[in-house]
Image (cartoon, rainbow, N blue to C red):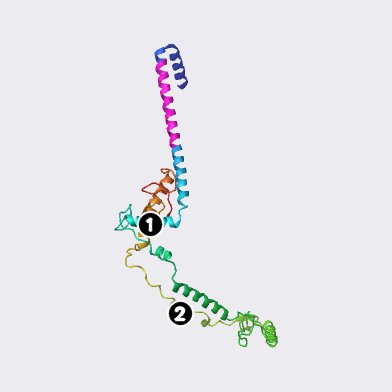
Amino acid sequence: RVLARKLYVKMRVESDSQFCGEYATKRLARLSEALAAYAEAHEKKQAQLFDAIAIRIQRARAECTTPAEFELLRKKLEESSCDGVDCPICLSKLKANPERLDRARGPSAEEIVASLRKEYEERRAQKKSPVELPPGYPTSDVAYAGPHCRLKPTDQTEVKKTTKRSQLKPQLKPLPTHTIGHSMVKKKVKAEAFPSVSNTANARTPPPPNNTPRGAVNNVPASDDRSRYGVLLSCGHCFHDACLSTFERYVEMAAVRGEGDTLIPTCPLCRKAYIKVEY
């Protein structure tokens, strides 16, 4: 059927001039549409490539942001809003992380003295710890005499004698047996050697106490305050940690499905690549 149609079109084009013009215009229109679609797809891919390169360049620049620059951004945010900084996603107030404030303040003089005192006590306890002797040495007559402790010659001879005697004597005694005819029958082992089931049941440790907070219902944990703390981006915007983490997961899922251009998340407001620190 295809060959027959090709032959018919060839014969009609050669014989009919009007049909030849219509066929040429239709064929050129199809070719022009295909070339336009190819050029549009190529331009779209090129634009995506340039955007990805620009985002990576922005991310590389953001990673060079110093703590002093973040401090300036933090001061600008606090000066711009008198009532407090709001999260642009959930429109609620942001909380400053107290751990960051403690780290920025640094340890006090009392804390430094306490840490030095603790290290000194640990070193002193290590020096006073007794010497660990190998098994077989008599521990009753040996006293601690410093890290380089040595036994007297008489004590060493006594230790050699005790070790020789211990080597000659068997350490494990066999169970007593008695003969009945030609068979050897072992005596029954006392039942006291094995703990009873009732004793082991009574010796079990009690279950741990229930430390579930009051806010947890149906095994759902209470809300974590850390998720309500703010994070400051290198572009100058501030969000809740939970809100920004949810947006980052959404961007990652969209990129995996093929809807996004890159896996690098961008700011929801200015669409710039960023790095985040505690607010």
- Give the mark nearest the N terminus, 1 or 2: 1
Vertical side of 41 occupied by 130: above or below: below
Residue at figure coordinates x 41%, y 16% from the top left: 21
Residue at figure coordinates x 35%, y 55% from the top left: 77
Vertical side of 116 occupied by 162: above or below: below
Residue nearest the viewer, comparing 149 with 8: 149
Confirm whether the magenta stretch covers residue 170: no
49 left or right of 170?
A: left
Q: Which residues are magenta?
A: 20-45
The answer to whether residue 241 of the structure is visible from this angle is no
Tell me the quadrant of the picture where the N terminus can be found. Answer: top left
Vertical side of 104 occupied by 153: above or below: below
Dot 2 alpha-carbon crowd within 10 angstroms: few under 14, some 14 to 19, many 20 or more: few
Confirm whether the magenta stretch covers residue 25: yes
Residues at badges 1 and 2 in contact (C-beta under 8 Å)?
no
The answer to whether residue 250 of the structure is visible from this angle is yes
Give the Cα separation between the discs numbered 1 and 2. Answer: 64 Å
Q: Please identify the quarter of the rendering in which residue 13 is found.
A: top left
Residue at figure coordinates x 42%, y 25% from the top left: 30
Residue nearest the viewer, comparing 235 with 123: 235
Residue at figure coordinates x 44%, y 31% from the top left: 39
Name the residue beneath numbered marker 1. Answer: 74
* Magenta region, main secondary structure: helix
- Residue at the top extreme? 15
Name the residue beneath numbered marker 2. Answer: 199
Dot 1 alpha-carbon crowd within 10 angstroms: few under 14, some 14 to 19, many 20 or more: some
Secondary structure under tag 2 reads helix
Give the percent coordinates (x, y) of residue 79: 33, 56
Which tag is nearer the camera, tag 1 or tag 2? 1
Vertical side of 151 occupied by 241: above or below: above
Secondary structure under tag 1 reads helix
Tell me the quadrant of the picture where the C terminus can be found. Answer: bottom left
